[in-house]
Image (cartoon, grey):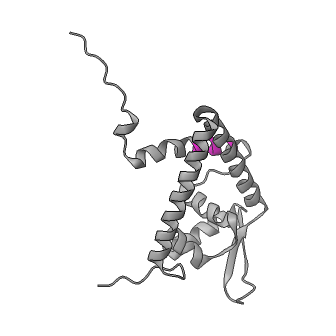
Amino acid sequence: MAKTPTPRSTTSDRDLRALLNVPQSDLQAQVTVRLERLGFPALRPAHVQVLSLIASDSLRLSELVSSVGLPKQTVSDMIDDLEHMRLVERFQDPDHGVIKRVRLGPKGKTWATEVRRVSAQTEARWATKLGSKKMKSLRALLEELASTVEQSRDGANGANGHRAPRRK
């Protein structure tokens, strides 16, 4: 007796993590291809996360540490790597003589521009497949979810963005 092939899992069989991973992987693949074509070095996901945070504004190392949730030395080493690749640069905080801030360097600004360009192109491609109404709904829901998660996280970390000390 011939076996019938097992049907591929449907969307309803996947957990939320798996569902979010599919479009994220598609977008990341598009970004990676574009950046490789332009000669940018391959970056680890943690480097991309740090660059993405810096892309919107210059930050202090302590702000990056609290945002990515990694040890200060690890984040500092990543900044060293990114600085060596000329994607970021450190400069003195104008409000504090000792503290350094990190911002995108010229090459990092080009990186951020290309990431935004590919993201927009990918979103347009998805809108063609889903329809513009569904894509607008998806974007609105994702923006609302991101805002809700950020507010919850910021509330848990306290008003200054630092995690509250753990009680024993």
In the rendered image, the vertical position of residue 79 relative to residue 163, given as above or below? above
Q: Give the image location of residue 123, x and y in percent.
A: 64, 42
Q: Quadrant of the N terminus?
A: top left
What residue appears at the point 54 percent right and 58 percent down from the top-left corner?
A: 144
124 or 41: nearer the viewer: 124
Q: Which residues are magenta?
A: 27-34
* Residue 144 visible: yes
Q: Does residue 88 appear left or right of residue 157 in this picture?
A: right
Q: Give the image location of residue 57, x and y in percent.
A: 70, 69
Q: Give the image location of residue 97, x and y in percent.
A: 72, 90
What residue appears at the point 71 percent right and 61 percent down from the top-left corner?
A: 87
Q: Does residue 11 appear left or right of residue 144 in this picture?
A: left
Quadrant of the rendered image containing residue 118: top right
What residue appears at the point 50 percent right and 74 percent down from the top-left corner?
A: 154
Whether residue 31 is in magenta: the answer is yes
Q: Residue furthest left?
A: 1
What residue appears at the point 53 percent right and 46 percent down from the top-left corner?
A: 24
Q: Does residue 88 appear left or right of residue 72 in this picture?
A: right
Q: Residue furthest top?
A: 1
106 or 26: nearer the viewer: 26
Whether residue 20 is in magenta: the answer is no
Q: Please, what is the dominant secondary structure of the magenta stretch?
A: helix
